[in-house]
Image (spheres, rainbow, N blue to C red):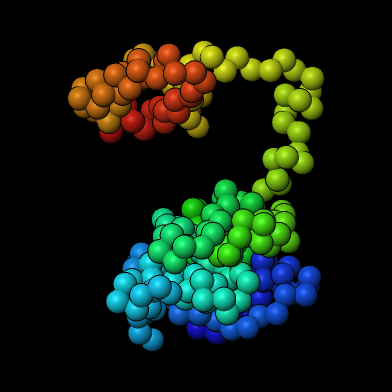
Amino acid sequence: YLATQDATVVAKLKAQGAIVVGKTNLDQFATGLVGVRSPYGAVKNSFNPEYISGGSSSGSSVVVAKGMVPFALGTDTAGSGRVPAGHNNIVGLKPTKGWFSTHGVIPACRTIDVVSIFALTTDNAWQVAQIMQGFDKKDEYSRQHPATVPTQSAASGAAAPDLKTPRYGRGRDSSSPAPPAQIRTCGTTAYGSCLRFVTRSMSGSGPWYIGLLGRPYRDH
């Protein structure tokens, strides 16, 4: 596979003067947390070649750890950015989904994939993040930064919601009855018992919400 255009985040960085040095090795298909599952060979840990580098964005973490570049990009679906950062003692920034555009990134799991940043310091990581962040209409999961967008209640002048009272999500089916009857989920009394135990335990722990799917859980 050869890309025909830059991903949105890469294009933003280049527009601000970033120089693309090259592409790095990684676990094939971005699947693996070890950095050794590549047809191009294993990526060695930056401290000891006998140790794994972590993955899947192994090469990106090692080139930063060795001082070859001030920062590098990776992806993170289930740890692929954080794990190699930890194995090589550098900063690994995993953004909230939608903060950085993933347009142009080959997905592993599109609903939770994010572009991650490797850097030697938090200041460097944050500087790169400020360039990369921003809404992208080409990415269906992209969102405006919450710090710059007022909430619906704030915009309408409505009173702040009561965060102390537990609320149950009704799911997509508004006709579904509310708990406690709805707690009999997944067709098993054991699951319902566990859920009731957890909700009772959490009820005195401050603000919390419980989302339930409603009818599909009762029917199956």
Relative image position of residue 90 (x, y in whole percent)? 51, 63
Tell which of 129 and 154 is nearer to you: 129
Q: Is residue 74 visible?
A: yes
Specify whether 72 is left or right of 107.
Answer: right
Against 12, is 141 above or below? Answer: above
Residue at screen point 64% across, 52% down:
99
Against 179, is 101 above or below? Answer: below
Specify whether 141 is left or right of 130.
Answer: left
Tell which of 68 and 140 is nearer to you: 68
Against 192, is 129 above or below? Answer: below
Residue at screen point 54% across, 59% down:
91
Against 207, is 141 above or below? Answer: below
Relative image position of residue 138 (x, y in whole percent)? 67, 61
Q: Is residue 60 visible?
A: no
Tell which of 2 and 78 is nearer to you: 78
Residue at screen point 79% across, 23% down:
156
In which quadrant of the rendered view does residue 164 lie? top right
Relative image position of residue 111 (x, y in whole percent)? 50, 53
Specify whether 47 is left or right of 154.
Answer: left
Q: Quadrant of the C terminus?
A: top left
Query: Furthest residue to the front?
Result: 47
Q: How many marks?
A: 0
Relative image position of residue 41 (x, y in whole percent)? 35, 84
